[in-house]
Amino acid sequence: MPTPTVLDRLLEIGELFQHDMATAFEGTTLTPARVRVLWVLQHSGPMTQQALASALEVSPRNVTALVDALEEGGHVTRSPHPTDRRATLVTLTDDAVARMRTMQAEHAELAAELLGAVAQTDREALERGVDAIATRLRELIEADRARRAGERTS
């Protein structure tokens, strides 16, 4: 059996995070996509569905379905925008704010637990390496996106 590569390990970590998230939300109406909406709202504050679609890089139709489900589950509310009568603001409910605070605390605990597996002397190098990999992957994705857009216009 070949020795796992760094990419193999990164893919495994991604799968483990997905499994952990799916397990964490079992029995709730939350899904990874819905939680992503909650994270964006938690960090950015109330926003229009159009701004939310842009922040999530999804279609307005997709955001509408996500917000509908989150509103039905009591996680967000829609209200008129104070300065644009055509727009609606999406805001976390008090219950969702409390849930997000809990999730942030759990997130911090998990980060500490995972970093605890790495020797203190290696952590700085690990963080630089992970940042470099994430930056490069974003660059590759953006280059691929630009290439595909160019092929569609040709």
Image (cartoon, grey):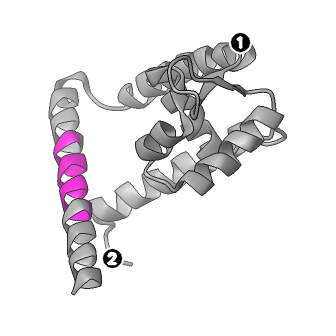
Q: Which mark is residue 94?
A: 1
**Tag 1's secondary structure?**
helix
Decide whether residue 133 is among the magenta residues: yes
Q: Position of residue 84 (x, y in %)?
A: 52, 26
**Residue identifier under label 2:** 2
Q: Quadrant of the N terminus?
A: bottom left
- Placement of 5 over or under 53, stated as above or below: below
Q: Name which residue type carries label 2.
A: Pro
Residue drawn at x 27%, y 74% is 149
Camera-side residue of 14 and 87:
87
Please indicate whether residue 24 sits to the left or right of residue 144 in the image: right
| Quarter of the view holding residue 124 | top left
Q: Which residues are magenta?
A: 131-141
Q: Main secondary structure of the magenta part?
A: helix
Task: Pick whichever of labels 2 and 1 is earlier in the sequence.
Answer: 2
Please indicate whether residue 37 sits to the left or right of residue 111 in the image: right
